[in-house]
Amino acid sequence: MNWRITLADLDIGVEEDAAVLEVLHSRWLTMGEVTQRFEAEFTVHTGARYAFAVTNATAGLHLACVAAGLGPGDEVILPSLTFVATAAAVLYAGATPVFADIQGEHDLTISAEAIESCITPRTRAIMVMHYGGYACDLPAVLALAEKHGLQVLEDAAHAPGSSLNQKHLGTWGRVGVFSFFSNKNLATGEGGMLVTDDEKIAERIRVLRSHAMTTLTWDRHRGHAWSYDVTEIGYNYRLDEIRSAIGLVQLHKLERNNQRRRDLTGLYQQLFQAQVPEVGLPFRQHAGISSAHLLPILLPPGSDKIRFMDYMKTLGIQTSIHYPPIHTFSYYRSRFPGVSLPITEQAAEREVTLPLHPLMDEAMVESVVEGVKEGVRAIKN
Ligand SMILES: *Cc1c(COP(=O)(O)O)cnc(C)c1O
């Protein structure tokens, strides 16, 4: 398919080329100085005490659950309107995901009220997800967690560069996890980062990320150690130097590109309100600074979404869905039957994601809005 306007695109240039070649020529390809620099710069960027680069955010979420001590018998409350990895990570750890509803059409993040109604004596943690880089109601979630003695984990996959009350998302809970997948705001192909202020959690992550070995290849390379012990089952969730090098360059571009996304989001909102007011705009009024990872709209109730997306396709405009709710997937339906989340289901039925990336210009946004206007009209009859 030759899209005229793609959903996402990457700001990759000569700096990434050079950074990758420099690593290749250094002849040290994984978990070395470049990764350490990436982690150090990420702590500065987020204000977290510790940062750990990992293979991808899914591995990171798994590690977060294990490091937080979650396991069989423990319930973790999380949204269903998220990528399936949020729930899969809880299952990898042997814990049980419990799906809570979202706030509403205006805010697609998990509702604190819904979380409270899901709490049982087995609840151990809340895993929030900052949809599109827009903060969930963290003050309310943290207060609830405090009241019930629960841990808060953050799936901050969308949220590099996002903050609420000047505090970076991912640093509000006990541990936060970012994704550097190819279509995310900071892209390394595969990749992710965990952040935490908690020394105990940091130590767990450090050990578990690398086979639970007591010394690392890097330390032995530098002559600091000869052998190692293994104290439990660990994982290989390391990030390589090549991706870390790309990540460093991407991190330096992040603020500029996020600002571009926010400006384009503002233009979208202005044009939709003026030209297609029947389309719902989640997060139109939102506290905090968002990475503006996604541009979700809600079609008028009862719209045939597939016909709409097909229409956009004939215009060469790529669209997507965020997300088919996890509790509606066949595996999750059979394993966790009877889950009913009316607000999530209604929003998901209407949600379509429009193109948003830092290489777009104003004319492209105007063209997408024009396309949506035609599309909404076309599916009415
Ligand atoms: C992309 C994404 C993930 C998984 O990230 P990977 O780095 O691809 O493993 C997890 N949660 C959310 C909300 C995501 O968007």
Image (tube, rainbow, N blue to C red):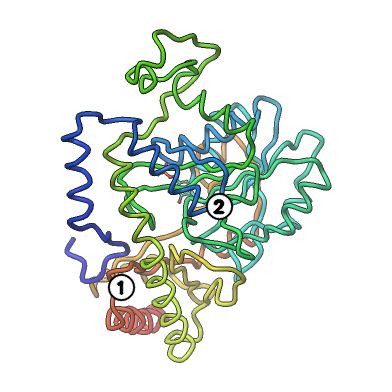
Q: Is residue 229 left or right of residue 377?
A: right
Labelled disc at residue 175: none
Q: Nearer the viewer, residue 109 or 1?
A: 109
Please tell me in which quadrant of the rendered image residue 284 appears.
bottom right
- Distance between the alpha carbons at the discs numbered 1 and 2: 44 Å
Q: Nearer the viewer, residue 187 or 343?
A: 187
Mark 2 lies on a secondary structure that is: loop
The answer to whether 170 is drawn above or below residue 345 in the figure is above
Q: In this view, does 211 lie to the left or right of 49?
A: left
Please tell me in which quadrant of the rendered image residue 93 appears.
top right
Mark 1 lies on a secondary structure that is: helix
* Residue 250 placement (x, y as % from top left): 33, 54
Q: What residue did someone put label 2 on?
A: 47
Residue drawn at x 36%, y 19% is 217
* Residue 32 placement (x, y as % from top left): 34, 31
Please tell me in which quadrant of the rendered image residue 255 appears.
bottom left
Q: Which of 108 and 186 is in front in this view?
A: 186
Residue drawn at x 27%, y 59% is 10
Q: What residue did someone put label 1 on?
A: 311
Identify which amino acid the numbered label 1 is placed on: Tyr
* Residue 321 placement (x, y as % from top left): 42, 60
Identify which amino acid the numbered label 2 is placed on: Gly
Residue drawn at x 35%, y 30% is 31
Residue drawn at x 36%, y 47% is 181
* Residue 81 placement (x, y as % from top left): 55, 54
| Residues tagged 1 and 2 counted as in contact (Cβ below 8 A) | no
CB of mark 1 near ligand 1 (< 8 Å): no
Could you classify mark 1 by the number of other residues whose Cα lies within 10 Å: few (under 14), some (14-19), or many (20 or more)? Answer: some
Dot 1 or dot 2, earlier in sequence: 2
The answer to whether 75 is drawn above or below residue 210 in the figure is below
* Closer to viewer: mark 1 or mark 2: 2
Q: Which residue lies furthest to the bottom in this view?
A: 274
